[in-house]
Image (spheres, coloured by chain):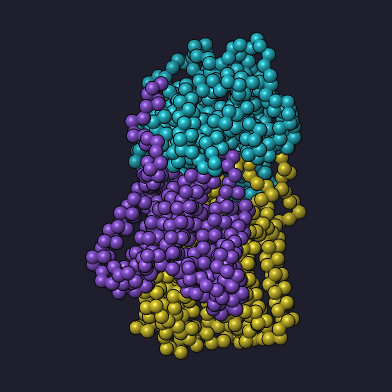
Amino acid sequence: MTGPAASVPIPGHDPATVLLRTDGVTKSFGGVHALKGVDFELRSGEVHALLGENGAGKSTFVKIISGQMRADEGSLRIGDRTMDAAHQGSTQATNDVAVVHQELSIVPTMTVLDNLFLGHPAVGFLYRRRELRRRGRAALDRIGLGSLNLDSLAGSLPLAERQLIEIARAVTRDARIVILDEPTATLSDAEIERVFGVVRELRARGHAVVYISHRLKEIFALADRATVFRDGRRISTEPVADLTPDLLVERIIGRNLVKERSRIANEDHAQPRSIRLDVKNLTCQPTFRDVSLSVAVGEIVGVVGQIGSGADDLIRSLAGARPPQAGSMLLDGEQYTPNSIRQALSRGVSFVSDDRAKNGVFLDVPINHNLTSMVLSSVVRGGIVRSGDERRVGKTLAKRFTIDARRLRSAANQLSGGNQQKVSLGKSAAMNPRLLLLNEPTRGVDVGARSEIYRLLRQLADEGAAVLLFSSDLAEVVEICDRVVTFFHGRAVTELKGADITEQSLLQGILNPEEVPL
Amino acid sequence: MSALTSTPTAETPPGRLTAVRSFFTDSIRANPQGTTVRAAAVVVLLLGIIAIPGFATLNNFKGLLASVSLIGIAAAGMAIITISGNFFMLSMGATTAVSTIVFATTLSLGLLPAIIITVAVGTVVGLLQGLVIGGWGANPIIVTIAAASIILGAGELWSGGLTIFGDGDPSSLNAVLFDILPVQVLVFFAVVILIHFVIQKSPFGRQIRLIGSNRDTAEFAGLPVKRTVIIGYVIAAACAAMAGVLLGAEAGQGNLGLGAEFDFDVISAVLVGGVVVTGGKGTVLDAAVGAVFIGMVGNLLIVGGQSFALQTVIKGVIVIVAVSAAALLARRKGKR
Amino acid sequence: MNPLVPVSTDPGRTSASHRFQRLSVETGIRLALILAIFVVFAASAEDFLSPGNLYSILSQFALLGLITAALGVTMIAGEFDLSVGAMVSVSAVITLKVSDAYSPIVGLLAGIATGALVGVFNGILVAFLRLSSLVVTVGTLVLLTGIAYQIANNSVVSYDNFDVSSAVDDPIAQILSARSLITIGILVLLGLMLRFLRGGRYLYAVGGNRAAAFAMGLPVDRTIVLSMTASATLAALAGGLLAFSLLGASPTTGGSLLLQGASAAMLGGIALSGGVGTATGMALGALTLTALNSGLSLQGVSSALIALINGLVLLIVIVLNARNLGTVNGLLVRMSRPLHSFRGRTENSNGR
C-alpha cells in the first residue's frame, strides 16, 4: 500500500501451475533504471492485468519476458526451465510466449492467412495452405471475423480488423503465455467483447494471459489479478475482486495525492485573455470526432488520453500533418485550414514532434544550424548566410533555451536527450510562433532538463504565444498546464482548470469516463 | 551570463583573410576523411614524382590535369545530389557525352553561344530528372539509370551514330596558359569554388545539407524540400554539360564514346573525397579533392604499366570500402 | 462507436476464388498487354509470327527472363541489385576462360560459383551493415566491371566450341531452345518456391513490412542474404549460358540488361517498395519487353531508338511505381492506407 517495498508478498490462491516467474529482474538504459528488482509470477488459467503509467516499466518488463530484450540482472523461469540473463531472448522462438504488440505488425501486402501464420512454429519448410486455411478459419471464427475472406489483402482492411487479426495470430500460436499490449485501443465495444471471449477461452484452457491496458472497465470485467508497476518496481499484485477503481488509481499514482507540486502554471485567471486558437467540432476520421476546445494567448493547455484516444492526433492535425475532414479552426479569429506543415508554419503555427531523432532534430548538423534552420531568412543578407549573424542569432537562441552556447558548433548528436529536446524546441520556437504545438515535450528527457523545458514553455506563453501540448506524463501535465482536456476514444470528455488539475482527476478522466459497475 | 558568452575555442577575429581561411578550415574540421584524402593525395603525388618514371613530365601532367578537370566538374555537381541524400546520379556520363554532340553541333553559332546552349540543354535534362525524383518522389538511382538510356538514345538518334565535327573554333578552351595551366583546369577551379561557395554559404546550400541529414525533419521544419532537390539536379546536370563542353572542345568533335567509366569515376571521386553516401556531410571541395586523388592514382597506374582494368577494380573497392565505413560509423553513432 | 470502413466480407465467394479473382485481374491486364503488342506487330510485319522470329524472341527471353527473376527476387525482399548486368559480363568471361582450360561443365559451374560468392558478399553487406542495397551494389557493379576487364584483358574472350553452342541454342520444336527451356524451368521452379515454401512467405514479409518481420522474429538477415545470393547466381547462370551461345564474352556483354530487367520486373507487377510480385509476373514482364523490342527491331527501328524507348518504358514504370499505381495490389493497399503513418514505418532500402 505504501511506496516501494523490497518484496511484496504475492497472494496465494488455489494451486495452479506457475507458468512464468521472474526474480529480481533489473534493467537499465544508459544509467537510468527502467526496472528494479522485479519479482513476478504468472499462473496458468489466469488473466493477469499489468498497470502503470508510462515509464513505470511495464513495456520493458514485457519485452524481457517476451524475449525481445535481455535483463541486466535477475532470472526468468518459464515452466521449469530457468533462463538466466544470458539465455533470454528466445521465448518467442520457443513458442512459450506470444505477444500482440502495441504497434501493428501486419504485413499489408500479404493476405490475412499469411499474416495469421507468419513466424508460426507449426509452419514447416513447406507452406501447407489447406491445413493452415482450416486453422485460420477456426481462429477467425473465434475472434468474430468468421466471414472475413482469408485471401483478402491485409492492407485493404480497416485498422480494427487488422488489430483483431493480430490477436488471432497470437492465439493461433497456442503458446502457454499470451501477452496482449493495449489490444483494444482501436476496437468497438462489440469487438472488444469478442476479444474478451477469446481471452476467457484461453483462460479456461489453462493458458495465462497478460493483459496490459489503461481501461479500468476492461480490467474489472476480465482480469483475475492485477499487478501495478511504478517507477520500475512491482508495487502490488492483488486479486481484482479485492480492488476498486479508486484503489487501483491510488496504486498507480502513489500515496501522495496531495503532493506538493511546484506548479508553474499561471493561476491568474482574472484577466480576460484573447482566444488565439478556437477549434469547433473538429473531426479526423477515425481518430477523433467532434472536438472543440480553445487556447488563449499566454495559456498552456494540455490534452491527455491513452492510445487510441485521438489526443495526439489532434495535435498533428492542428500542425498540418494530418488535415481534418470536418469542423472549423480559427486562429486569432481568422479561418485556419492547414493542409500541410508549411501552410501551418506560414500562419505562425509551429510543431515540436514526439520523436526528435526521427523528425525533430538534425542529428549530425551543428546545433547552431539546427536552431536557425527555421529562421534562415533572418540570417541571410545579400543571398548569403552570414555566419556572424548566424552565430549571434544562435547564441541568443541558445541562451534563451539554456543550451550551452560554447557548443554551438558541435553536432546535435553530441548532446544528451534533454539538450537535444531543447534544441528541437528552440528550433521550432525561434520563429516566435503564435501557436506552439508539442507532442510529448519531455519524452526521454532527464529531470534537470525537464524543469528547464517547463520553464521555457511558461516563458514562451508569457511572451505571448499560445501553447497546446499532448503528454502521456500526467505529473508533467499537472505541473505546467493551465487547463487540460481529457480524451477518451476519440472524443473530448472533460475539461479541468487550475486547482482541479490533479493526477487523480486526470487519470480518472482518461480511464474511467463511465461508472464502473461494482 | 559571461560564462555563456565567453568562448574557450579561439574565435576568429574579423578580417577578410581569416574569413577566407575559416572558410576552408570549417570544411576540413567538419570531415576528417577529407583531410585524410588531401594528405594521401599529396603523398601519392610525391610518390609518383619520385618513384614512377614518366609521371613527372609536363605532357603527363597536362593530360592528367585535363582528365581530372572533367571528372572534377562532374563530381562537384554530383556532390550536391549525394549531400542532399539522393545517393548518386547515374546519368552524368550520358549527359556529358551527349553534351559533346550538342556543343559540336552548335559550335557554328560561335563559341559562347555553343557553351550557353549546351549548358542550357543540360539544365533541362536535370530539371526533368529533378521533377521526377524530387517532385514526384520516384527512386533516385533508377530514374537516373532510365534517364541515361533516354539521353544516350536521343543523342545517338541526333548524331545518327556518326561523329559530329564542330564547325567553329573552340581552341580558346583548349589553350594552355603559361604552358602549364590548361584552361580546363581554370574552369574546374571556377566551377568547384562557385558550387562549394553556394553549398556552404547560400540558404539553398544549407537546405540541401539539412535535407540530406534528415529529410523528415526538413519537412517538419517547413523547408521547401521538393523545390530544393529539383534545383540540385538542375545544377548537377549543368555541371555534366559543362564537362561535355570541355571534352567536346578538347576532342574537336562530338562523340558518344565516353562510356560508363565516367560515372564510376565521378562516384568514386565523390565518395573517396569524403562525401558521405547517406547525405548531410561532406563538401564540394571534398569531391574535387577526391577527383584529383582518383585521377592521380589512375594516372600513376597507367604510367606505371598497370592495366586500365585494375583502375576500375580499385575504384570498385573504394566505393565499397567508403560505403561500408560510412555505415559502420553511423551504426556506432547509434543512427540506426 | 467510430464509424469504420465497412468490413470487407464476401459471403458469396470462397476464399480461393477471391484470390484467384484479384490475381487474374492483374495477370489478365498483363496478358492483354502482351497480346496487344503481338497483334500490333504481327499486323505490321509479316514475319513477326514466323517460327524464326518467335525463336528469336524466346531466345532473348531466355536471357532477360533470368535477369528479371534475379532482380525480382531482390525486389520482393525490398532490395535492389544493380550489379546484375555486370555479373552477367563477369560470369560470361569466367565461364569461357575456364571452359577453354577445362570443360564447359566446369566453366559453367565456375561462373555460377562466382555469382554465388558475389551474392553472399552483397547480402552480408546489406543485411549486417544495414546498408542500402542500392548503394552496395553500385560498388559491386564497379568492382565486377573492373574484374571483367581484368580477366578479359580488355578484349573479347572467344571460345571455339560449336558443340556447346548448338547444345544451348539448337531449336527445339522450332521456337524453343535449351536456354529458353532452362529459363522457363527456373521461372516455374521459382514460382513454386515462392508459393509453396515457407521461405517464400519470409521473402514477402521482409519486403512488405520489415519492421514487423523483425518484431515477429522472422529470419530477416538470412532471407536478405539468400535473396541477394539468388540474384547474383541467376545472373551468373544467364551470363554463362549466354557466353556459350555467343561463343564470345566481353566486359560489355551485360550491357543494358539491368535497365531491361528492371523494366520487365516492374512491368510484371513487382513493386520497388517490396512485398509483392510473382514468378508469372516476372515471366510476363520479360516476355512483354522482348516482344516489344523484337517487334520494333523488325520494323526497322534503329537500335538507338530502341534503347531510348527502353529507357522511357523504365521511366514510365518507375513513375507509376512511386505512387503504387502499377499494381492492383498496390491500389488496394493505397486505398486503405493505414493510420499512424508516423509509427511502424517499413524500413527496407528502397522506402519509396
Residue C55 in view, yes or no: yes
Quadrant containing the N terminus of chain C is: top right
Image coordinates for residue A1, horizontal then vertical, percent: 47, 16
Residue B94 in view, yes or no: no
Image coordinates for residue C266, horizontal then vertical, percent: 60, 63
Residues C32 and B82: in front is: B82
Residues B106 and A113: in front is: B106
Give the colour of chain B. purple
Residue A265's quadrant in the figure? Answer: top right
Residues B274 and A150: in front is: B274
Residue depicted at 71% across the width and 45% down the height = C7
Residue depicted at 48% across the width and 68% down the height = B172
Residue depicted at 35% across the width and 83% down the height = C102
Residues B138 and C4: in front is: B138
From the viewer's perspective, tell me whether residue B283 is left or right of residue A351: left
In the image, residue B54 sits, relative to residue B33, either above or below, namely: below
In the image, residue C341 sits, relative to residue C184, either above or below, namely: above
From the viewer's perspective, tell me whether residue C2 is left or right of residue C174: right
Residue furthest to the front in view is: B178
Residue depicted at 58% across the width and 20% down the height = A463
Give the colour of chain A. cyan
From the viewer's perspective, tell me whether residue A289 is left or right of residue B94: right
Residue furthest to the left in view is: B50
Residue furthest to the top in view is: A270
Image coordinates for residue C315, horizontal then vertical, percent: 62, 63
Give the colour of chain C. yellow
Image coordinates for residue B261, horizontal then vertical, percent: 45, 68
Give the number of marks: 0
In the image, residue A180 sits, relative to residue B235, either above or below, namely: above
